[in-house]
Amino acid sequence: MQWILSGDPPIRPNNCLWCCVCFLVMAMIQFSRTQTSLFSLLRLLSPFYRHKVSRRSMASDAATRFDFLVIGGGSGGLAGARRAAELGATATVIESHKLGGTCVNVGCVPKKVMWNTAVHAEFLHDHSDYGFDIGNVQFNWETIKAKRDAYVSRLNHIYRNNLDKTYNNKRKAKIETIQGHARFTNDPEPTVEVNGKKYTAPHILIATGGYPSLLSDNDVPGANHGITSDGFFELESLPKRSVIVGAGYIAVEMAGILSTLGSKTSVICRQTGVLRNFDAFISTNCTKELQNSGIELWKNTQVKSVSKKDNGLLEVTLVTKDQEKKNDEEKINTIQEVDCLLWAIGREPNTSGLNLSQVGVDIDERGFIIVDEFQNTTRKGIYAVGDVCGKALLTPVAIAAGRKLAHRLFEGKKDAKVDYSNIPSVVFSHPPIGSVGLTEEEAIKSRGKENVKSYKKSFTPMYHAITTRKTQCIMKMVCVGKEEKVVGLHMQGIGCDEMLQGFAVAIKMGATKADFDNTIAIHPTSSEEFVTMR
Amino acid sequence: MHTFSCVSYCIISLILEIKWQGVWFVTGTFDYDLVVIGGGSGGLACSKEGKCLSTKWGIGGTCVNVGCIPKKLMHQAALLGTALKDAQKYGWQVPGPISHDWRTMAEAVQNHIRSLNWGHRVQLQDKKVTYLNMKGRLVDEHTVQGLSKTGKETTLTAKNIVIATGGRPKYPTHVPGAIEHSITSDDIFWLKESPGKTLVVGASYVALECAGFLTGLGLDTTVMVRSVPLRGFDQQMAGLVTDYMEAYGTKFCWKSVPKRVAKLSCGKLQVTWTDRQTGQDQQDSFDSVLWAIGRAPETKTLNLEKVGIKLNKESGKILVGADESTSVPNIYAFGDIGEGRPELTPTAIKAGKLLARRLTGQSSELMNYDNVATTVFTPLEYGCVGLSEEEAESRHGKDSIEVYHAFYKPLEFTVAERDGSHCYIKVVCERGGDQRILGLHFTGPNAGEVTQGFAMGFRCGATMNHLKETVGIHPTCAEELTKVNISKRSGLDPTVTGC
């Protein structure tokens, strides 16, 4: 019920803001000293008895007590709750919106569906080269939008079922889900309040995720006419003219999908290329591929203002200035008749409304929750995982962190923690990018230029042997030291999305260049080029 | 200072890996330090400065001409056929009916092969390799005689001789009409016209790959299987591969053996076969019959036994040692022609390089033939490395292994409303200790690309924990391998739900 409220029918077209809001989840705890000591005593008693008592305590202002209270039903929170329950804890998930979080609703999953849709557009260029006679192909956005939404709903249900069937082995109880916003109370022991009821637990996990940043009208006049990646998933038709602001992976993915599906697309980036925090080899290549595919790239450019015309379309005014050239004059340009202005300028944590300062959970200057390597916040008994911590904003990382935490808290595995090094990730650009470990620049910085050796390869994948359309596959291996330990692997090309995972296992194991050389190739693939590099 | 290599089979990109240090060689009374008979993957990788003789195919061998390269391209064409159906589910309105023109595809594939042949010739020239388009035969342990197409003979002597002439598809010996009226994988890629309704005899990976792409291109295709599919591979995985093919339109005649092939007046081929289960004979007519019942070595014209090279009587392959040596001290053999060797391009290339290094004294490293990863490019690709479940059981005992498995649904299948019930992962590992991985199996899209990296982890000694400790890449199929956690022994449902 609550999520319908928070997911209110859009009042204005740019309802992404509302989506951000709906991901907010809040918490609170209320407890008198006597109750605290009573509970401490009861906790020593049998689980059965304890459970019964906690049921009884639901009355009025007494807080309902669980072993593990999770705020946020996204990837990290659900994984943590389920693992905790499997390990015997009573766990509860508080979610204000749909289960599944960013990944399922407005992230990885619908994004990948759209990427797959776009990949078909690329295949359609190649069909005739491979002998297929196809006539004039038309694209219908409504079809894929409906299918995608249906699939996401199915996943929401699957998540619900997964929670329902994750039985606590000792108590034969399922994980409870509380629909609503959580807010920390000012009780002495960490307590959250949801819909006027109080809940507490010795272990409370904040896994509320994040939302895409949006500039205010004060920053850029008319900025509000734009949408974010959240709004992208609500578009009811394919925009004719798209402007994507940003140079990170979300900007690259959104621009790639829109352009490949047939929208005239421009990317506005402040510097000279996209993916500036990736290895320069990848950054340069991706920028090139983006332009080759027909995307208009505005370098050294920012949006100055946005105005909505009578026909409902936007006029986006840009200012371009090469920062390197001191005497370079600002150039002003406009893009007319824009029906999709998408801000992809970063993500922010979902913390406002949680009342974090009340319980002494510190945040950094960007608002992300500060945690140590064990996901502990600055308040004992409160933990945080996933995007809300601002580090490695990736679903599998949040899942791993949630599970490790559960093992640490409920299985006594004191050292359980996520290793944040060598996390592989893929950008679903055209073609896709895979990356794990250090960039060459990072390796040189930490190990010194003389200790770093890189191997590179660039080729046209065999798929294109008989196609008129071509893409390149580029690969780079960064090695350090005499033993040539592989510390980074970077790639862009067809199949790189599926190629990286196995190599990531080997790199995690400490593989050297010699290990790559000693592996027999699988022929004919693109990935075999990694084991035949010289 | 020359070495000499007569062509027969496979790849070239890795040609001339070895820096031969010419000065180390004192050829004495021989023309060459080394003669390599066979210009395929292995032969080319082994040779440096030499001459090549080419047989039926252009330089590059089976892989380039009648193997890996054309089959992968035709597999790719078939995948595009499937993609065209999926596209409609993704909102692409494709005006039907969709037709495929064999001639367009085949010409493109053949042109690509010719460009590779040419590229190889140029590379050989660049590396000062003398290329002789001749058929080689041994005269004695140091002498090779080459016979050109025009009948010109050339005699060369060498200190060492390496035989890497590969193999060719077999025809049956007791099926009347088979040789006259049928084709093999040597022909299929070079057909100018569509093979039409096709019967593929055999259930080797070659048979299933050919049947798979023919079906994908819209042809009525039947596979005739005598016993089991993909012999030597994990049989559960093999079953998933053939189940998927059946679900996507390939017909299977199980437990059947062909009896005769007759050409009808209409030009069709009438095939009679016996159903081994019922003992009944059955008949149907086809436009083409393709035999894929195994491969035989190219040794007959080499005159091997006369110079004392021992062969396996049954397979006809050369008996080889761990260092690729034959029963004649200065003659070596590797690649498809070696008894017990995997018939794979990359192993031939690697073995060729290592042999060359040993012969030049640069290294003493032997080829490690264990745990070679491979991928079968059937419509649902199957990649694997290490032991099958059956093999792990027989070597280690059922109680000493743990098998983790998962049925997963690729994200690309969901919107396309495709049946994903054949997409499966199996990790066979030791039950005790760190649970070292013994075998890793994967069916699904892009299995070739997925498997390579895991094969490397496997080679480094990966355990179940290494898989679990690696963060997944979401959403991909490959990440499922890092998430697999249900053991067969537990009896729990291995179906993956959610992210």
Image (cartoon, coloured by chain):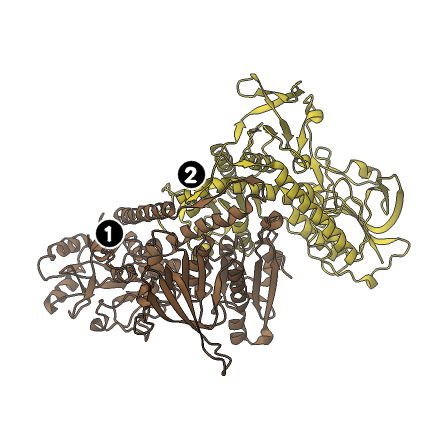
| Vertical placement of residue B130 versus A40, above or below | above
| Viewer-closest of A111 and B336 | A111
Question: Which residue sits at x=70%, y=49%?
Answer: B115
| Chain that appears brown | A
Q: Position of residue B362 (x, y in %)?
A: 74, 61
| Vertical placement of residue B279 versus A505, above or below | above
Question: Which residue sits at x=87%, y=57%?
Answer: B27
- Left or right, A196 with reference to A162: left
Q: Residue furthest bottom?
A: A327
Q: In this figure, which residue is indicated by the disc labeled 2?
A: B419
Observer able to see residue A522: no
Instruction: Give the quadrant of residue A257.
Output: bottom left
Q: Residue furthest top?
A: B280
- Left or right, A338 with reference to B49: left
Q: In this figure, which residue is indicated by the disc labeled 1?
A: A175
Observer able to see residue B365: yes
